Amino acid sequence: MIGLRTLFRSTMAYSINTLVGPLFTIVLTPIYARVLTQADYGALETIEALGTVLLTIGMLGLRTALGVFLRDQPDEQTRLRLISTVMTLAAGCAALLAAAALLEVLAYVATEATLVGAEITAAASGFAQVAADAIAPLLA
């Protein structure tokens, strides 16, 4: 029974991680279609693509590395130190990405662009992904 519970928790952690981004897309696409012009929507998609690239680079492969190295650690104290290090690096990357997104939003506000709401939503989606990536190994 314990093995089944662990399997369920791991499955839920990775499922949530995988479903967060597409869920935002499904919910927000009709709103974007009504509110944004074609040019604004194109800009939003470009920003989201850039955010995905930055997120991939920003996470430095930490999720994969943690999965590989966690089981190789000899004791619980070393495992906890490894998890703590990965969480600190992930939080630092998330903070840098949040600062970049905030600066981008402020730039749009300063120029009174119509894309401000979409920027905030795209940034929230990206940060939800970072948080899910950081938490998933802890739930496994």
Image: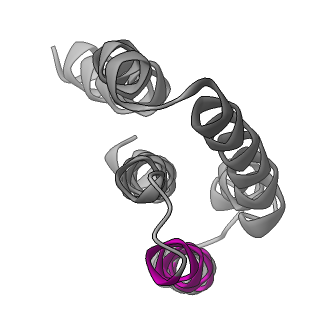
Location of the N terminus (image quadrant) = top left
Residue depicted at 50% across the width and 61% down the height = 113
Is 16 colored magenta in this rendering?
no
Q: Residue at x 44, y 52 (%)?
A: 114
Residue 113 is at least partly visible in this image: yes
Residue for point 69% across, 53% down? 51
Of residues 2 and 19, the one drawn nearer to the viewer in this rendering: 19
Q: The C terminus lies in which quarter of the figure? A: top left
In the image, taking residue 38 as reference, residue 32 lies left or right, namely: left
Image vertical order of residue 7 relative to residue 87, above or below:
above
Residue 49 location (% of width, % of height): 75, 40
Q: Is residue 103 magenta?
A: yes
Q: Is residue 60 left or right of residue 110?
A: right
The residues colored magenta run: 95-110
Q: Residue furthest left?
A: 1
Please name the predominant secondary structure of the magenta segment in the image: helix
In the rendered view, tell whether residue 21 sits above or below residue 58. above
Point 78% across, 51% down: residue: 50
